[in-house]
Structures are given as structure tokens and as C-alpha cells.
Amino acid sequence: MTKKILIRVDGSKKIGLGHVYNMLTILHFLRNEQILIVMNEENKLGSSKFKEQKYKIKFFKNNSELLKIISNFEPDIIFNDILNTKIDYMKKIREMSSMIVNFEDVGKGRAYADLVFNPIFNKKKMLTKEFYGGKFACVRDEFRIWTNSSLRKNVKKILVSFGGTDPTQITTKIFRVIEELSLKNIEFIIMLGFGFEHKDEIKKAANHLIKDGYTIKLIEKSDFLAKYIRYADFAIVSNGRTVFEIASMQVPILSVAVNDREKSHTFVRDEKIGKHINYNPVSFTKELSFNIKHLLEYENRKIFRARLKKIELLYGVERVIDIIYDEFKLRT
């Protein structure tokens, strides 16, 4: 029987597009259901991604509009991928649906959800039916198609990706370290995301390096990160959901936490599959330089690669869908 599923999701230059891509990945497995996407008018970056896939979408300006949309839709299940939820919000929507599923939520409101999936966090005081760890990460389909089998003695390619927005301009700062280390024998693949604000500055900095003999390849608005990761010896990325996608292809990671929330994401450190930096404007370039040198060493990458091979990340989305459907069956 077709279920009505309301997807409450946000995307913005501040919080990035990880939530949007997470929901798109899950929705691929829910094609037979009646879906409604609901986004805050102020946090609708990435809404075009849903429209491209022909999903029905509605925007709201305040809580009363949101609650009206939910009430009119009469959902069987509500998905929340909006960071931490508040108790008041959860109590109100609790009355409008038989089941609530939250993603990346360590807020107090999660106590009122039926299921909570927190793959990127360490276990907190775990609630009933709350799931932590990488095996519940929803890795996009493209990472099942492409593979990375190279473990070269000498690094030839490094991928750099700071999500859809890169508000702290980490990408530009990485250029300075590339120049300081004189890494002219390595190709740097720079992913410029959907919501990048500083493209002109990045292009200017890249052209400066290219003229000086460096190899910089800028990739704009590509949804297919996997086809570039497959050739990378390691990746320098923000410490969000992208780390699961990189890890699923067994590529060592240098992760950078650019905000307080990303500092609480512990996957790379827990699994010891690369190096991690908490961004500090004073010490960042020094730390970045030290950790890039560490990953340039073949023996270090070999160790990280061996650990990556032991992690199962490709089938998290199926696990999540099965858990959701099993829970729903118990309620009907």
C-alpha cells in the first residue's frame, strides 16, 4: 500500500547540501511512495535537485505555515533531516503522523522520534531505536559504480572538496600550502560545489599557481564526485557526510572540521582511516602542511587503506530503508 512520506529538509550556504543529498539517496529507494519535500524559505539551497527528480516540493516562512502543510498532507511518515530538533516542534508533529524518523539529530527533540539515524556521531546516551556508526551511512549510488584500486608509491592526484558552499574559504587556504610545499608534481582536483560563493577568488588563485607550473583542475557543479575520487591517492575534505563517500571507495582522508558540529563528527578519528584537523585560523596552514606531508608517505597511506578495506559502507541505505519499513509494519 502506498505510503505518504513528508521529507522535512534544509540546505543553505551555512549548513551545506549534505542533508539534501542524503534525502535524495534515500528517496531513490522510495519511488513507489507518495513524497512531499518541505523546505524553509530561508534554507532552500538545493531545492532544484529535488525538482530535477520531479519531486513535489513546498516552502514555508514560519512554523504555522509548516504545520499547516503537514496537516493538509496527512503523512504516514515524517523524515526530519534538519540538524538538531527541538522538543516543541517534535511534540506538535507527533500528533500529525504515526511515525517520525530523524537523521543527524543529537538534539533533545530526538527523544520523540521513532527512529534516529546518526551515522556520523559517536554513541551518546543512546535512546531506544537509535542507530550510530558508519554502517548506517547512506552512500550515494555513484559510489557503488566507481571503484578506486590504486595504491601508488608516489602521490599523483589529490582531491579537494569542501561541500557545496565552503563558507570559511578553506579551498583558497589550501592553495597557499600547495605553494609552500612546492607540490608541482601532483595534480590537485578541486571540486567547486553547487553553492560556492568565492569562485572568482579560487579561479584567480588557481590561475596564479598554474602559471607557476602547478597542476590545478577545477570541477564546477559536478554531482559525480566518485569519478574523480577513483583516481585520487587521498582526499582533503570537510568533516561532514562526504567522509563516508570517500571512505567507501577506500581512499585515505584528511578531514577538516570547519564548524562546531563537524568537530563532533568522529568517524575518521574513530576508524583511524586518515588524519583530522579542527579548523583554527591561526594554526590551520601549519597543521594542514604537516598532515599533507604525513599522507604523502606511502607507508602511511598503505596503513589507512588496509583499515578502509575492513569498513562496510556501501549498503547503509538498504539497512536504513529496511529498518524504517520494519518499524512501520509494526505500527499498521
Image (tube, rainbow, N blue to C red):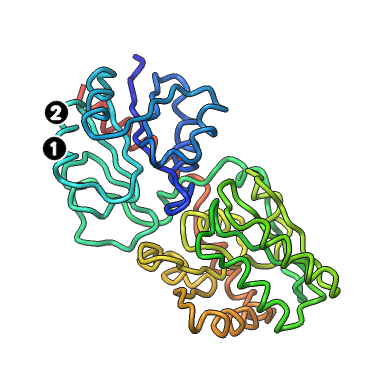
Relative image position of residue 141 (x, y in whole percent): 58, 40
Relative image position of residue 122 (x, y in whole percent): 32, 63
Q: Tag 2: residue type? A: Glu
Above or below: residue 24 compared with residue 332? below
Label 2: which residue? 95
Which dot marks residue 274? Answer: none
Q: Nearer the viewer, residue 235 or 67?
A: 67
Left or right, residue 204 beside residue 276: right
Q: Nearer the viewer, residue 266 or 166?
A: 166
How packed mark 1 is, by other alpha carbons closer than 10 Å (few <14, some 14-19, many 20 or more), is: some
Residue visible at 81% across and 67% down in the picture: 215
Q: Nearer the viewer, residue 178 or 264?
A: 178
Cα distance between the residues tagged 1 and 2 = 7 Å
Residue visible at 74% across and 65% down in the picture: 206
Quadrant in which residue 119 is drawn? bottom left
Quadrant in which residue 183 is drawn? bottom right
Relative image position of residue 182 (x, y in whole percent): 76, 82
Residue visible at 46% across and 66% down in the picture: 258
Q: Nearer the viewer, residue 115 or 86?
A: 86
Relative image position of residue 142 (x, y in whole percent): 62, 42
The N terminus - image quarter: top left
Of helix, strand and loop, which one carries label 1?
Answer: helix
Label 1: which residue? 91
Residue visible at 26% across and 34% down in the picture: 62
Left or right, residue 278 beside residue 70: right
The C terminus - image quarter: top left
